[in-house]
Structure formats: C-alpha cells, structure tokens
Amino acid sequence: DKPMLDRTQAPEFHKIKEINIIRTNKATLSNQNTVYTLPLGEQELVRIEWLLEAGNFYNKLNGQAFFTLKMLQEGTKTRNSNQISADIDQYGAFLEVNNHFDQAEIILYCPTRYVSEVVPIIAEMLFEPTFPESELEILKRRQSQELQINFQKTTYLAGRAFRKALFGSQH
C-alpha cells in the first residue's frame, strides 16, 4: 500500500541533473527520401509517419489540401474505401491523417509483425489513388454538416476571431 499523495503540498524542488535524449538514425533511400528511426530495440507496435510537403499553404482553392488528403483513403486502383479500411483493420493497425498549414501527415500505428503487409496499402493510397466522385460528395456533405455544428460552438468561433485579429481577414 502506497500512502496517498498530499496534493495540497507542492513537491520538493530539485535541479535536473541529466536529460537523456535518444538520438535518431538518419538514412536516405534510393528515391532520395529521408527516413529517421529511433533505435529502441524490438517493439510490439510501430508508429510510422509520412510527412508530406502539402497543407493549406499550398492550396490553390479553399479546402484543396484537406480534401485531397482525406480522399487518399477513399479508393485506389484495387481497393475501395471499405476494403482499405478492412485491410488495415484486419492487421490491428490504425491510420490517422492530418492536414496542417504547411504539411500533411499520414500516421500508421501497426503491430510490428504486420508492417510488411500494411505499408504496401499505404503506398497504394499515396501512389494509386482514384479520388472517387461519390466518396468526395459524401465527404463534402459530412464536412459541411461538421462546419455547421462548429459555427454553433463558442470555442470554434473564438478561434476564428482570434486568428482573424492576429493575421487579418485575408489569411
């Protein structure tokens, strides 16, 4: 039995003596892409991130980067959106896609033993997307509904007002 912490008392102050930062290994692939890895030994789960030079900064039209990134999951030459999702799920993997101002990221969480099965699915999404029109219409409707909901949230409206005050209305 551990004694209950007394949260009314601040912990004792002490200087940090040492910070150990794990250094990454950097490699350049034959296609000139750079890969960074952390030497952590054998792990049951791996996280792989693809950082793409994309994002809102590169938009020619509003929403272009966001919709392009989201649509990568909606179909390839050999898989529709349901097959992509099922094929990733069957290996206990999880995919996350995020659009940012100056980059897009695709993050894969996958059991290490299935990486060689799942990474080709991601490669197919990146290099053989079909951007099916029907899926785009569904995504547009979903985003429109989400935007309507967001316009009722004070935190969303405050964030918009803050960015407008900080960067101007044309940003």
Image (spheres, rainbow, N blue to C red):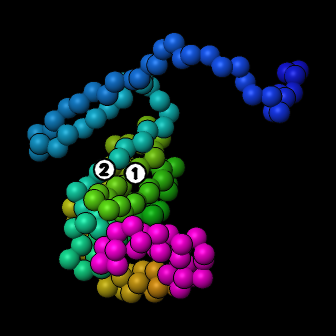
Q: CA distance from mark 1 to mark 2?
A: 6 Å
Residue furthest to the front: 165
Point out residue 140 in the picture as x, y percentages from the top left corner: 41, 84
Q: Which residue is mark 1?
A: 107
Q: Which residues are magenta?
A: 146-171
Point out residue 117 in the picture as x, y percentages from the top left corner: 36, 47
Q: Looking at the magenta stretch, what is its main secondary structure?
A: helix
Q: Quadrant of residue 88?
A: bottom left
Q: Secondary structure at mark 1?
A: strand
Regarding residue 104, the answer to whether it shows in the image is: yes
> In the picture, which quadrant includes the C terminus?
bottom left
Q: Secondary structure at mark 2?
A: strand
Q: Is residue 6 magenta?
A: no
Crowd class of label 2 (few under 14; some 14 to 19; many from 20; radius 10 Å): few
Residue furthest to the top: 17
What amino acid does circle 1 point to? Ile
Q: Which residue is mark 2?
A: 50
> In the picture, which quadrant includes the N terminus?
top right
Residue at the spot x=25%, y=66% of the render?
Answer: 57
Q: Are marks 1 and 2 in contact (CB under 8 Å)?
A: yes
Q: Nearer the viewer, residue 164 or 77?
A: 164
Crowd class of label 1 (few under 14; some 14 to 19; many from 20; radius 10 Å): some
What amino acid does circle 2 point to? Trp
Residue at the spot x=48%, y=37% of the render?
Answer: 45
- Nearest to N terminus: mark 1 or mark 2: 2
Residue at the spot x=48%, y=14% of the render?
Answer: 18
